[in-house]
Every structure is written in C-alpha cells, then in structure tokens.
C-alpha cells in the first residue's frame, strides 16, 4: 500500500524544503517516492533544481542504480529507489471536470432547461470543480495512491488556510455532488417522459450517453476515497512546519487541533530556521539564540504528545539535491 506524508503550515516556513528532503531520503532508502506540490506558488522546482510540470517527472539516477547524481556529483544510495516530482497545475486539470458540466447541461436541456456553454461555465467556475486547487489535490491524491506506482507520496501542501480547506473538501463537496446528482436524475426523468410521449417505444434508442453520470459518480467516489485515506493513521501522517515564533506557535496549535478533530494523524512538528551555533562575539546572535531556545521549549510544552524536530537556521534558499540531502538527515523518512 502507498503511504502519504503531508507537510503543512503557514507560507514561508519551509514546507517545500521538508517535503523535498523527505522525498530524497525515502528514495535513497529504496522507496519509489513521489513528491507533490499543491501550493499555487510552486517552489519545488527550485528546491530540486529541476523543471517540473503537471505530470509526475522522474528525477534521473545515474546508470549504477546504487548511485544518484546532482550538479555537485554522484552520491551513494542505501538501496536502489526512485524519485519523482510534480507541481499540480489547476488549469491543466480543467478537462477532468468539463465532462461533468457538459453532462449536467445535456440532461437539463433534455428536460427543457436551456443552458448555453457560457452559462455552464459560469456555474462551474464559481464552485470548486473547475477552479479549486484543493479539489484537484484531493482528486489527484487518489489517482497517485491507487496507481500503485509509488510506495510513498509526499505532499508539499499550500499555506495553512488552503490546507484546512483541502481537508474539509470531501465533506463540503459530498452534499453538493449529491445535489447535482439528484438534479440530473430529475432532469433525466423529465426528459425521458417527454421523449416517451413524443416517440413512444422508439425513445429507448439513442438515449443520452451515461459517461457523464458515471464520471460524476466516480468523482464523488474519489472524494470519499480521499477522505478515507486522509483519516487512515496506518497510511497517512501530517507534519506541521513552523518557525520559532510566538504567532507561528499559536497558528500551528489551531492547525493541529483542526486536523486531529478531523481524524488526521499528526505525530510531528518540524521547527525550521532554529539558530544552533551563535557567534560568541555577537551579542545580537546570542540574544536570537536564547529566544529560539525559549520558543522551542514553549513548543515542547504546547505539544507534549508530539515529536519535535528542529532544523538549523540557514542562509539563502535550499536548492539542489546535495543541499536537500543535508536537510534530509535531520528528518524522519516516512509514516
């Protein structure tokens, strides 16, 4: 079975770095690993120094399966694994939902309710099916996990607000999809009755295509499947990334509480950018070091039941496999 690791938190705390580092560590340990960015402001390409798109791309290992390569050279793998990465593009996924809109419009027309293409587009553009990165993430989550291509899928999620909507989405969309299905059913019954009255027994031939209805049902089933995956503690873990700051601690507390109420497993906090080795001759550095120590202690007190991992303060962005690997040594690998 495919495991899932989610990294979440507010913007700019280092979720992408953590997701990339975990993915590299898992691949080095012999796991077939996919890293997924669901953040509209993608930076996974920068972290891995690789051009990524809306389809999973395999990061090439060198010919020796026990070695990987980066711009800095080769490094040895514990076991031959594989590393893939993808940046989800909502616009590239619009076709996945256009069939739902077209099928609904066809059934409404058959019942005498006339909607042109622009009206259908407005209906669906105002809701999640045609324009939600969270919904696309949930839909693709199921696709990636159930494909069997990967052992672990690591998600670099969007900032906290987006993350909360992502986990709420199955419950929000379930009733909406049921309403759409009911509306379609009523429209079809009206349309079938009208055709029977006009064409009699011949109306049984040349009826509307069922592909749209099946797509709608399959779409709802995928959301229900996503909800099951997210709340399965044996397969899914959510890790919260934060900085050693007071506001970040309060926001992370709300996020952890919300996730746990939703039945999502949260075992670990990753405190990023912690100053660990201050210059003894720099009073300002020492003050920052002391403040970070107090914040980390506060985090332990606030979250007594969670594991806390700290990552050192760094200058500049973490870019390239070698830089990412240096972070991976400080992080746990998978679920």
Image (cartoon, rainbow, N blue to C red):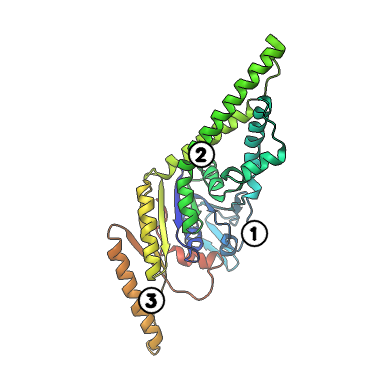
Residue 276's disc number = 3
**Circles 3 and 2 in contact, beta carbons < 8 Å:** no
| Mark 3 burial class by Cα count in 10 Å: few <14, some 14-19, many 20+ | some
Give the mark nearest the N terminus, 1 or 2. Answer: 1
Where residue 143 sits in the image (x, y, percent)?
54, 41
Identify the residue at image location x=54%, y=58%. 67
Where residue 100 sits in the image (x, y, percent)?
62, 35
User: Does residue 12 appear left or right of residue 200 in this picture?
Assistant: left
Q: Nearer the viewer, residue 166 or 186?
A: 186
| Mark 2 burial class by Cα count in 10 Å: few <14, some 14-19, many 20+ | few
| Mark 1 burial class by Cα count in 10 Å: few <14, some 14-19, many 20+ | few
Residue 288's disc number = none
Where residue 219 sits in the image (x, y, percent)?
55, 36
Give the position of the N terminus as an image quadrant: top left
**Can residue 31 be seen in the rendering of this structure?**
no
**Can residue 59 be seen in the rendering of this structure?**
yes
Where residue 296 sits in the image (x, y, percent)?
33, 70
Q: Residue furthest bottom?
A: 281
As displayed, is residue 75 above or below residue 220? below
Give the mark nearest the N terminus, 1 or 3. Answer: 1
**Circles 1 and 2 in contact, beta carbons < 8 Å:** no
Q: Nearer the viewer, residue 186 or 231?
A: 186
Question: For the residue labelled by badge 1, is the local secondary structure a helix, a strand or a loop?
Answer: loop
Give the CA distance from mark 1 to mark 2.
25 Å
User: Does residue 132 appear left or right of residue 110 in this picture?
Assistant: left
Residue 51's disc number = 1
As displayed, is residue 32 above or below residue 310? above
Question: For the residue labelled by badge 3, is the local secondary structure a helix, a strand or a loop?
Answer: loop
Q: Which residue is mark 2?
A: 146
In the figure, residue 284 lies in which quadrant? Answer: bottom left
In the figure, residue 71 lies in which quadrant? Answer: bottom right
């Amino acid at each position: 079975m495919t495991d899932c690791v989610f990294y979440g938190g507010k913007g700019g705390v280092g979720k992408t770095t953590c997701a990339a580092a975990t993915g590299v560590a898992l691949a080095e340990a012999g796991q077939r690993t996919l890293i997924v960015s669901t953040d509209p402001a993608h930076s996974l390409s920068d972290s891995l120094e690789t051009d990524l798109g809306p389809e999973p791309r395999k990061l090439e290992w060198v010919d020796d399966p026990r070695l990987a390569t980066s711009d800095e050279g080769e490094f040895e793998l514990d076991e031959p694994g594989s590393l893939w990465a993808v940046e989800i593009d909502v616009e590239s996924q619009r076709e996945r939902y256009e069939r739902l809109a077209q099928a609904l419009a066809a059934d409404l027309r058959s019942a005498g309710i006339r909607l042109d293409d622009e009206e259908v587009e407005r209906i669906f553009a105002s809701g999640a099916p045609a324009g939600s990165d969270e919904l696309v993430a949930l839909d693709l989550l199921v696709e990636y996990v159930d494909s069997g291509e990967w052992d672990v899928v690591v998600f670099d999620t969007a900032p906290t607000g987006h993350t909360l909507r992502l986990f709420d989405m199955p419950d929000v969309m379930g009733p909406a999809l049921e309403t759409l299905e009911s509306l379609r059913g009523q429209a079809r019954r009206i349309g079938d009755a009208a055709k029977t009255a006009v064409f009699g027994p011949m109306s049984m031939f040349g009826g509307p295509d069922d592909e749209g209805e099946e797509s709608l049902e399959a779409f709802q089933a995928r959301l229900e499947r996503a909800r099951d995956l997210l709340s399965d503690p044996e397969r899914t873990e959510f890790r919260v990334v934060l900085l050693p700051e007071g506001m970040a601690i309060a926001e992370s507390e709300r996020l952890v509480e919300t996730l746990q109420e939703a039945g999502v497993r949260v075992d670990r906090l990753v405190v990023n950018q912690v100053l660990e080795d201050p210059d003894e001759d720099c009073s300002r550095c020492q003050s920052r070091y002391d403040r970070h120590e107090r914040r980390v202690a506060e985090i332990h007190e606030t979250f007594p039941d969670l594991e806390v991992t700290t990552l050192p303060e760094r200058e500049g962005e973490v870019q390239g496999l070698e830089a990412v690997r240096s972070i991976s040594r400080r992080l746990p690998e998978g679920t």
